[in-house]
Amino acid sequence: MRASMKLLPNAFGNLTNLQHLNLTGSCDLEMLPNSFGNLTNLQYLNFYGCSRMETLPHSFGSLIRLKHLCLKGCSQLTLLGRTLGNIRTLESLDLSDCQKMEVLPPQVTHQWSLEKLFLWNTKLKDLPSDIGNLSNLEILRVSFEESSMEMLPPSFGKLKSLKQLTLFGGIWKCLPDSVAELKQLTDLTIDCGRIEYLPAGVIEVKSLKILKVIRCPLRKVPFGRVENVEGKDASPDQSGGKLLNQSGRMLLRLKQLDLHGTRITELSFAEGICPNLRQLDISDCLELVEVGALPQTLISLDLNGCYALKRITGICGLTKLRELDMRKCEAVEELPGLETLISLVHLRVFGCCKLQSITGLAQATNLQIPISEPPHSDSIEWPLFKDLKLWKEQMHEQQWEGKDFGRRNDLEVEAEDFMGGNEQLLKAESSKGGNEQQLEAEDLKGGNEQQLEGEDLNGGNEKQLEAQDFMGENELQAEAEDFRSGNELQSEGEDSSWGNDLRLGVESDFRRGNALRLEAEGLLRRRNALLRKAEDLLKRENALRLEAARQLEADDIADQRLLLEPARQLDADNIADQRVNED
């Protein structure tokens, strides 16, 4: 339909066989004809972005076969008490951005087949007490702007099929204990500003794979700091008052745990708790002081912005850890156990101003060093690389110029004078041949090579990292300036805000690049698998065709023999008769 149409014609109701109707982006549409209810075969209906539509006709409730209804972005729409009327077949309902909706229509909780319910960015103040009637609901996403509800309805635990639950806003301080009854729950995300603790029953949800409790005053988790899980009762202060079972194995399927922006002061995992955890995010926990034992399966650990963190004892033995982000952990003085991080690829320690040394990385041969983060310590032991890999932190080439930071043995990852006074190219020692080789990075777009040069000027003067632009354009120079005094940066008092802009750009580009790379690799693997399968099918087809041709040829020969046999027999009989006559 035309975007300028304000009212559908009354004859629209004559399309009684219509099953799919998409009116997305009809921003001028204000009203539907009352004949709209004649579309009794309609199954899919999308009004996304119809921001001027205020009401639905009374006949709307006659759409008795409707399965999917999207009213997202209908900001002026008011749903009356009987809007859904006789509809009982809904499987998905999206009321997001319906900013005039303060109460959920009562018919919603009577949609026994409803599987997906989205209530994001509405004026909804609470959930109906009979929300538990939606026994087939699998996905629920709700945000509360001005909620007065202090607790979710007790019937919440009756949502036996619920798999994904996202709650934003609200003033409640905890979840109901009935959350332990959500046996199918795999993804739980809570972004509520007042949540102080989680019910102990959370650890009994065996199907849980993703748990996010973020930006709230949460101080304790029900699975942290358990001294003895083998048949010993955990104290209420440590596990939320819940006794662990005899095996002590909880949250077996949990892969991702996000507690960033909470008020936890310490975190430690007992043996058997989250044994398959792969990602842990406790960034921006301003009161976090200590990180103890961690699951050995961790691949990513984010501690960025934990300013009060002093002790990290749990990283020892994390042989699968690939990403460790410790930026702005200003109170950390040492990192014990780095020698066990043999799989480490990404290490970020920018802003760790008290960190005196980083040693034990000799085995981390895949480590990639961010060139925009100059080291702060006098003693940093980097591994012997076969191919040193430098992160390119921005889409365009940038030139980092670092001055003498005030230390005689100032180390720069980008350009380090290994000989103490001679100008030389940064070389990587080959572990087998012992020959030096020049570090080269192939330009992914232009095919040009970048040469990393390091120049020692009289034992500690200026060192400059130069690289050619990826696209052959002019070189860009990023100079590090002291934002407070106007002087050049020194490692003793480097302004922590120096890398904020770079950090944001780097994280975005790096994540996007990783996602694209993984997607490309997956597509390539799928393509190769399909090609191999197609080749096998082609071979089988050719073999079958060849066999069929041979069989057809054999059948033809047999048929010809059968046809010729009577003629041969007749000729033989004639010859015999002639001989008899001659005699």
Image: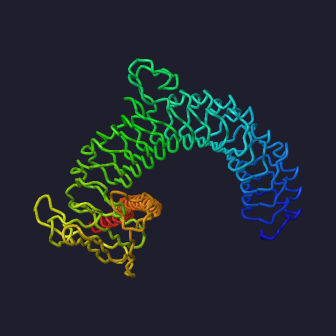
Res 152 → quadrant: top right
The residue most toward the front is 485
Colour setting: rainbow
Residue 460 picture location, percent across and down: 22, 67
Q: Is residue 230 left or right of residue 210?
A: left
Image quadrant where one finds the N terminus: bottom right
Q: Is residue 117 left or right of residue 283?
A: right
421 or 18: nearer the viewer: 421
Q: How many discs mark residues in the rendered view?
A: 0
Res 16 → quadrant: bottom right
Vertical comparison of 172 with 546: above or below:
above
Residue occupying image coordinates x 71% and y 46%? 145
Vertical comparison of 387 with 219: above or below:
below
Residue occupying image coordinates x 50% and y 32%? 220
Look at the image and tell me whether residue 537 can be seen.
no
Residue occupying image coordinates x 54% and y 40%? 213
Residue 231 picture location, percent across and down: 40, 17
Residue 87 picture location, percent across and down: 79, 44
Q: Is residue 156 left or right of residue 520?
A: right
Vertical comparison of 41 with 214: above or below:
below
Image quadrant where one finds the C terminus: bottom left
Look at the image and tell me whether residue 155 can be seen.
yes
